[in-house]
Amino acid sequence: MTFGASRQKKKYMKKNNKNSVRAPFYKAIVVGVSAGGFEALNTILPALPADLTLALLIVQHRPADADSYMTESLNKKCAITVKEADEKELIMPGVAYMAPANYHMLVELERTISLSTSPPVGYSRPSINVLFETAADAYGAELVGMVLTGANSDGAHGLKVIVEHGGLAVVEDPESAAEKNMPLAALKCVKRGHVLRLEQIAPFISKLALEAEQRENFNTGKT
Amino acid sequence: MVISVKKSRPTEGEDIEIGLLIEALYQRYGYDFRDYSRASVKRRIMRRLSLDGFANISQMQHRLLEDAEFVDTLLQDLSINTTEMFRDPDFYMALRKKAVPLLKTYPSIKIWLAGCSTGEEVYSTAILLSEEGLYKKSIIYATDFNDHVLKKAKAGILPIEVMRGFTSNYQQGGGEEEFSKYYISDKRSVIMRGALKKNIVFANHNLVTDGVFGEMNMIVCRNVLIYFNRRLQNRVLSLFTESLVRKGLLCLGSKETIDFSESAHDFRSISAKEKIYEKKQ
């Protein structure tokens, strides 16, 4: 289900595309996920192709002393690289960066990753809002924000900021989510975007990446 | 004339203002946040902006230039002071197993804890050293650029409700004593035992602007470099290299690494996971 996204995109392109300036396309997807996230990520990430032209930055709420087992097990199952983010790492397409347990993950304007031990935000560290808000600053209209299953309301404000900066909102259908509170909170905050069932999300990401790639080829004259 | 705006980032103007505010703080008061990771600094400035109800960052800059008290508020905002006793217990376990045997070979030990904040890790280190029989011949230099946190660190007073978590950290970090023997408690708070403070020297030192702190056998600086950009990280790491004796130890936070810095070739890793390095020459 889509609500108003295409209209917003058109308006954006009209405003910014007058003098054959390259149309914006998505460079990164930020994902916020909490309770039920293990299954959600295990459904989405293994279904993505190795040559994905987008980067993924993921905050999965987990205990402060959680180890990197989840990341490592995902990496084994996926064609894309799944890794815990290192500080000052340059964000690359085809890689999913997981926020390390007990650190906030932030995006710098030069599109590198920063980590922080500053106090939890809304009881969470890593906080989805911290990732979303800083990524919105760095990527503007080239960003997609996704709020998946979870029992709290982290990410709702961040998703609103992403949309205000011209980015695209995607929310997991509360009916398909293991925990629906987080998607519901996001839908309350955001007026435009897509609501997708869990199984629709990976194909949607692949489609976005393909569109971006085609646009890139068009602009560089490749076929 | 038509002025074309190059890029479509809505916050570009705001980011320029943030840069100017940081420049003003440096030029007027000498506090240098210019090479800090900007995303984190911006979040904290924007939080202050909304708390104090400034209309925009330029208005805040004007206040900053005129009002020395406000500078102090902003400095507290910009300094991150989250810390725990025995934070990352695995690190303290590695310290016991990998660093202590090397430290035991010295007749006296100088340790620099840079960016010590409110002192939780200073007392953790003192406890570990005393359990390993090294505290009596050690001096710990605990430094921070923030006088408020140094004062707290010196006092060694902690709210009682955090002690349960710290006790569990201590045990996971290889501690086998009754943790409560290291502090005196009343209903609300605990105070670290005086014996632990005996060989600790608290001092103000700013890693960004101050110089070498000489002849250290070990430097512990955890979760400080993550707030700096690459250039400043290089500066601080070379400061550490110069401050260490030959075969001195450098301990960084678990998400920090020396690998991509200019100092990489000066060290060899002795615990890859817990980020403990030994200076080569």
Image (tube, coloured by chain):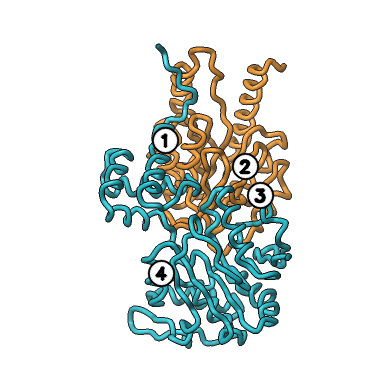
Q: CA distance from mark 1 to mark 4?
A: 33 Å
Determine the residue positioned at 26% across, 50% down. B67
| Near-viewer residue (A180 or B199) | B199
Q: Residue B186 in the image: x percent, y percent?
A: 34, 84
Above or below, comparing residue B56 to residue A2 in the picture: below
Q: Are the residues under marks 3 and 2 on the same chain? A: yes
- Mark 1 or mark 4: whose residue is earlier in sequence: 1
Residue A128 horizontal/vertical position (percent): 48, 48
Q: Which mark is residue B150?
A: 4
* Tag 1 and tag 4 share a subunit: yes
- Return the mark for residue B122: none
| Labels 1 & 3 near each other (Cβ < 8 A) | no
In the displayed structure, would residue A160 be above or below residue B216?
above
Query: In this figure, which residue is indicated by the disc labeled 3?
Result: A83
Q: Nearer the viewer, mark 3 or mark 2?
A: 2
| Residue ID at (70%, 41%) | A80
Relative to A26, B270 lies left or right: right
Image quadrant assignment for residue B279: bottom right
Tell me which chain appears orange: A
Marks 1/3: CA distance? Answer: 33 Å
Mark 3: amino acid: Lys
How many neighbours does mark 4 have within 10 angstroms: few (below 14), some (14-19), or many (20 or more)? many
Task: Decide: is A11 above or below B218.
Answer: above
Considering the numbered disc 4 on the image, is that residue within a helix, a strand or a loop?
A: helix
Q: In the rendered image, which residue does mark 2 sit on?
A: A90
* SS class, disc 1: helix
Q: How far across and how far down the image is residue A94, in percent?
A: 67, 38
Q: Colour of chain B?
A: cyan
Label 1 sits on residue: B16
Name the residue type under label 1.
Answer: Ile
